[in-house]
Image (spheres, grey):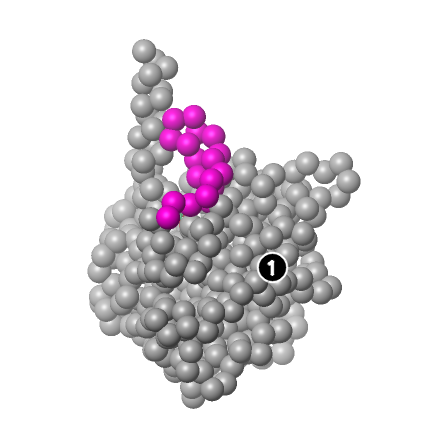
Amino acid sequence: MRNNLYLLLAALAACIPATAQSHPDALYDEAKVPKYTLPDPLTLQNGDKVKDARTWINKRRPEILAIYQEEVFGRSAAPPAKVDYEVVSVEKQALGGKAVRKLITLSLAGKKVNLLLYLPAEAKKPAPVFLGLGFSGNQTVALDPGVPLAEEWSIDRVTRKLVHKTAAEDSRGKSTQQWQVEKILSHGYGLATIYCGDIEPDFPGALAYGIRPLFFQPGQTMPLANEWGALGAWSWGLSRAMDYFEKDRDVDAKHVAVFGHSRMGKTALWTGAQDTRFSIVISNESGEGGAAISRRDFGERTKDLNTHFPHWFCANFSQYNDREDAMPFDSHMLLALIAPRGLYVASAEGDQWSDPRGEFLGAVNASPVFELLGKKGLGTDKMPVLQQPIMHDVAYHIRPGKHDVTAYDWDQYLKFADAQWLR
Ligand code: GCU
C-alpha cells in the first residue's frame, strides 16, 4: 500500500512541470521581506572605490567574475584551441522561402551537439543572430519538417529513471510561441537554438551523459566543489556556438544576443558574464540564481535551487543555503558583468516564484556599473507597471501572465535589439 502511495506521489510529482516547482513555505508577502544590505559592485575587495572604467575592467570585474566562478556556477573548462564543427546541411528555401536553414554539428570535446540556425533569406549582409538553449529538441522551435528529431532525455514518471529516446514526430513546432522565428526573421535577424540535453541532460544524475566528465582529470569521478555545474556546461556550449558564428560568413558575430528563459535565463546571464563576445544578454524570468536578488526572502531561495537542482550550480554554492546575507555577491553583480553591453531583464506578473521585484532590483542595482561605463542604466528604482518597458542600455519589463516566453516578450527584445544594433 505504502509502495503504491509512493508511486502515485512520484507520478504526480513528475506531472508538475519543472517550471512550477515551489515549496509550501515560500514567502510571497512584500511587507514581510526583511531588510538586507547589498554588497557594493563598485567597491574593490580591498575597500577602495571604483571610480573609473579602467578600474572596473581591470580590477573589479575580474574580482566579481572569480567569485562567481569559485562559489556559484563553478569554473568551466578552458575554451578549445580550435572550433570543431561540421555544416551538415544548408536549405535555402526553409520556412516557406523566408529562411535559410543550416544544420550544424558542433563537436564539444568529441560530443556531438546539434545547432539549428535560421537566417533571413533576403539578407544582403551577415545577419545578427539570437542564440538560445531549448528545453527540448530543436524540432520544437519551428514547424519545419527538415529539422531532424532530437534524441531527448526525460525522467520516467514511475521509475524516476532517466529515459533517452527519439522525440515524437508530433513534437514539431511545439515551442514556436516561445521562439517566434518569423518575427525574428522579419527584423532581419537570425535564430539559433541548441537542445540543452545535447550538452548535458537536465536531471540530477545525468552528469555521465554530458560533457563535464570529458574534462575530468585521470581518476576524477565528480566535479570539484569549485568546478562547473550543468549551467556552466550549457553556457560553455553556447560559447562554442559563438566560436562557430565567428567562422560563418552569413552571421554577424559582433551582433549576437544570447537569450534564455528561466534556468536557461540563468545560463544566458552566466554566458554573457563570461564571454564578452555576446553583444546583448536577455534574461526572461531567470529568477533565483539569475537576475533576482538572492537576499530577498521572496519566492524561490538559494536552498530550493540547491535542493531541487543539485546539478545546476557548483557544490560550493550550497554553503549559502539559508545564509544569503553572507554572500560576497548578489545578482546585481552578475548583471553588472554584462556591462557595457546590452542587458534586458524581463518578468511575468504570474511568476512570483521568480520574484519579479527581485529581478527588477537586480537590474536597478547593476545600473551604476553601466553608467560608470558611459551607458544608460534603468534610471529609476520605481518598478514600472505592466507592459510599460523601460528600454535603455539596461532594459526591463513585466507583463501579465504566467512563467513563459510570449510574443509580447519577443516584440520587446526585438525592439531592444533594433535600438542596440541599428544605432
Ligand atoms: C524551477 C526552478 C527555477 C527555474 C525554473 C525553470 O521553477 O525552481 O529556478 O528557473 O524551474 O527553469 O523553468
Image: 177 above or below 182: above
At mark 1, the secondary structure is strand
Q: Is mark 1 within 8 Å of ligand 1?
A: no
Image: 16 above or below 45: above
Q: Is residue 367 visible?
A: no
Q: Nearer the viewer, residue 7 or 90?
A: 90
Give the quarter of the image for residue 3.
top left
Task: Give the x, y percent position of residue 213.
Answer: 66, 43
Q: Which residues are magenta?
A: 152-169
Left or right of 423, for residue 22: left
Residue under label 1: 106
Q: Is residue 209 visible?
A: yes
| 186 is within the stretch colored magenta | no
Left or right of 333, for residue 83: right
Identify which residue is drawn at 51% across, 44% down.
201
Q: Quadrant of the N terminus?
A: top left
Identify which residue is drawn at 58% across, 79% down.
249
Q: Amino acid at mark 1?
A: Leu
Q: Residues within 10 Å of mark 1 (few under 14, many from 20)?
A: many
| 167 is within the stretch colored magenta | yes
Task: Give the x, y percent position of residue 309.
Answer: 47, 41
Image: 171 above or below 122: above
